[in-house]
Image (cartoon, helix red, strand yellow):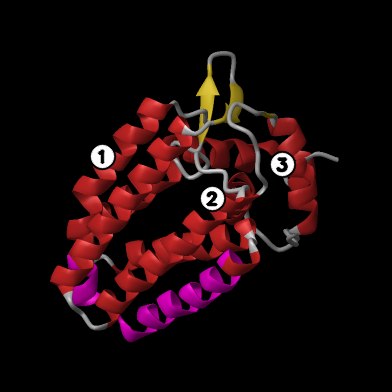
Amino acid sequence: MDALERYISDHKTDFSDADSLLLREIAYERLKDAIRNANLPPGEPLSENRLSKLLGISRTPVREALQKLSQEGMVEIIPGRAVRIANRSFKDVVDVLYIRLLLEPGMMRLVAENITEEQIDLLWNCIVHMEGAAKSGDRPGWARADTVWHETISDACPNQLLGEMALQMRNRIHQYANVENELKIQQLINGTAEHRQITEAVATRDGEQAEKVMRDHLVSVRENVFDQVIYR
């Protein structure tokens, strides 16, 4: 049993009452979750038939889910209808981080000025989970909480297109960092502290500070990416 099969088997869902549209969305969410958290290597092939059997649904919603994931840059559909986990080059990652630096600081100012109390509570809940996961070295648990944090930020942005674009840019390079050794665990701890600073600024509705700390965080992310290349 490989990582993908193990992850999907451990996160089963009952599809008995789902209609075709819902099946597509369920397949999309399940596959997106597995790609993010099952430690699948870039370039690993994905089979519609196999995914259909693993999920217990027909190929059509699986195909539609893969097409959506391709549009978001998480998988690649190549000639011959082969599908594989997206394989990002170092330049791809640097390009995406450049775009994130253009988009997300300004987005955070909007978020701080428009976020709801319920969304602030969600952010704080994510921070608690991220801090616990970082200290224990639980990389998958940290990644799940981090994903919810970013999705909450995206939802809180009053400019829906901006929020969606920022989230898609993040998804395009989510697999690049593979935190395993002590240095990288420390980067997780540092990154969590930066997320806390952003959340504090958002919770106090300080748009200027939220913009600044998000920019600082993304610069730190970029430095970590360069460090990974230098010390490989």
Measured as percent of width and height from the top left, residue 136 is found at 65, 67
**Residue type of the residue flagged with mark 2:** Lys
Residue range in magenta is 109-134
User: Which SS class for mark 3?
Assistant: loop
Q: Which residue matches tag 2?
A: 184
Residue 58: which disc? 3
Residue 98: which disc? 1
**Residue type of the residue flagged with mark 1:** Tyr
**Residue type of the residue flagged with mark 3:** Ser
Q: Is residue 149 above or below residue 103?
A: below
- Characterize the local packing of mark 3: few (<14), some (14-19) or many (20 or more) Cα atoms within 10 angstroms: some
Q: Residue at x 78, y 57 (%)?
A: 10
Q: Residue at x 76, y 34 (%)?
A: 50
Comparing 55 with 134, the one in front is 134
Q: Count of labels shown?
A: 3
Q: Is residue 109 above or below residue 173?
A: below
Measured as percent of width and height from the top left, residue 180 is found at 62, 48
User: Which SS class for mark 2?
Assistant: helix
* Closer to the eye: label 3 or 1: 1
